[in-house]
Structure formats: C-alpha cells, structure tokens
Image (tube, rainbow, N blue to C red):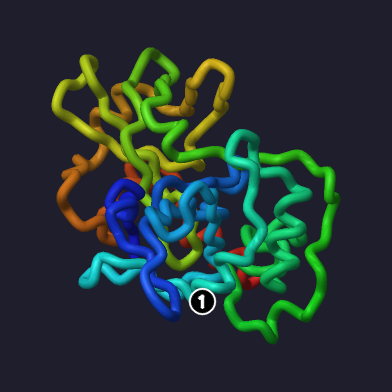
Amino acid sequence: MLFKSKNLETYKLTSLDGDIGHVRDFYFDDQHWTIRYLVADTGNWLTGRHVLISPYSLIAAIKGDQRIAVNLTKQQIKDSPSPDMDKPVSRQFEYEYHGYYGWPSYWGGPSTWGMYDSPAQDPELWGGEAPSGDQQGDQHLRSTQEVTMYDIHATDGDLGGVEDFIIDDVTWSIRYLVVDTGKWWPGTKVLISPEWIERVSWSESKVSIKLTREEIKASPPFLADSLITRDYESGLFRHYGRDGYWAHEAEQMQAA
C-alpha cells in the first residue's frame, strides 16, 4: 500500500509489549530513494534518545488502527545503539546497529535491500552473517523533513516545492515526491517519480527533473485526498512514455 509520509508521522509505533511513540522523521537512501530508518519520537519513555527503527523490524502499517507495528520489545529498543543526534548517521554506526539486531546490511548486495527487493524479515534468509561492505563507505542518508520544500525545477523553469513523499510499505521505497506547484499553477499538486529526477543539489536544496512544465500540466490530475491506484499510476507513467517501477522490479526478480 502507498502512504503519505506526513500521514505516517501521525501513526503510533507499537512494539511487542507496548507503545513506543510515533514517527518523527524518515531517513532515506538518496541512491535508491528507499526509507532505511524511521526516526521515533519516544516522548517521555526514552527522553533525550534518538531511536531508529529499521524496516527489517516492521510488521505492518495498519491504516485502520493508525499505527505501525514493530516486531521488537521495548527492552530491545532501549538497549539498542543510539546515534549522535547532532551528527549524520555514519556507516560505522550502521554496522553496530545492524549487528546488534542481527540484521543483514541493505548496502551489501545488488538489490534495493542487499540481495532482495524488500527488507527480508525471515531470519533464515539473513544467513547469520555480519553486515558486509565498506565500513567507511560513503553515506547517502537524507531526512524527508529536510528535503520537504526543496525547490523543484523542470527543464524549462521552476515547478514548485516538495511537500510530501509517497512511500510503499512493502519495499519502503519512495515512489513519488508530492510537489506543490505554488505560483506557477496555484492550488495544484503533482506527483514526480524519483526515476524522473536528473540531479539533486543538496547544497542548494534543489531537485532538477527531466520533464517540461507543459508535460507536467498535461499529466493525469492528482487529487491529494484520493487513493493512488495502479490504474492511476499506469496512466501517469504512460503519459510520460515510461515503464512503471513495478515492471523494473519484476525484471530484477526474474534476473535474480
């Protein structure tokens, strides 16, 4: 299912033995545009702690209950490594964190989640191996809150700003950026796939896409309160003359 990140931030986080707070932010990998960690606001339970929750531990985002179920106990979370809140999450910390839980490294293979397209939650698939890869490798984690309101530029002019993200709760990939078109097209929001991004200037807070404003204006209208269906997505990708992300993922699964 597809969820808006701002909606997920209103969901409770529930462990195996009680509530642990709610989502405050998401850290995503700017190479795969995939959520690697949920940042938990634990309220009065763990005051002053920066708690990360990996999709490896998520059972489901339950829309009816407005909660995200986490397959961990409160004690496991309390005893887990905690990153320095004033510094970016380092790869060295990720080694320690994944090693604590016994999870594989998402960066240790050719697919979005190492050897898989989604975070494998069956311990038998993890192989009991320690996280692999370069412990000092480059980091590519970004905050969704930081990227919100980055400027979006089409090939022929300004488009607007990032307002939200659409997240797939199976793969935890960011499927779309929700763009508020602002003064250019008042009162309108459009969806932009990360696949259509040409370049991101993190220093300038700017995203450049390989589309014209007229192409975007002629795209299937996005109604912010409507459910995003596969029919709508197919029409959107067809409008831009591109295959849907689900076709690419099917090809990757066949190749594996």
Q: Is residue 250 visible?
A: yes
Residue 248 lies, in percent from the top left, at 54, 58
The residue drawn where x is 84% and y is 50% is: 135
Instruction: Please name the residue shown 42% across and 25% down the image.
Output: 150
| Mark 1, secondary structure of its residue | loop
Vertical arrangement, residue 246 with respect to residue 25, above or below: below
Query: Does residue 138 sit above or below 155 in this rendering?
Result: below
Q: Quadrant of residue 126?
A: bottom right
Report x, y in % for residue 106.
68, 60
Q: Along the line of sight, which residue is nearer the eye, 120 or 145?
A: 145
Q: Name the amino acid, label 1.
A: Thr
User: In the image, 63: left or right of 30?
Assistant: left
Q: Is residue 204 above or below residue 217?
A: above
Q: 157 or 214, which lies in front?
A: 157
Q: Which residue is mark 1?
A: 73
Viewer-closest of 151 and 58: 58
The answer to whether residue 233 is seen in the rendering is no
Which quadrant of the figure contains the N terminus?
bottom left
Q: Residues within 10 Å of mark 1 (few under 14, many from 20)?
A: some
Q: How many marks?
A: 1
**Quadrant for the C terminus in the image:** bottom right
Q: Position of residue 116 (x, y in %)?
A: 64, 69
Residue positioned 67% across, 58% down in the render: 81
Residue 109 placement: quadrant: bottom right
**Whether residue 75 is situated above or below residue 2 in the rendered picture:** below
Residue at the far bottom in the pictured view: 124
Q: Find residue 113 and report its horizontal and vertical position in percent.
A: 64, 62
For the point 49% across and 21% down, the residue is 205
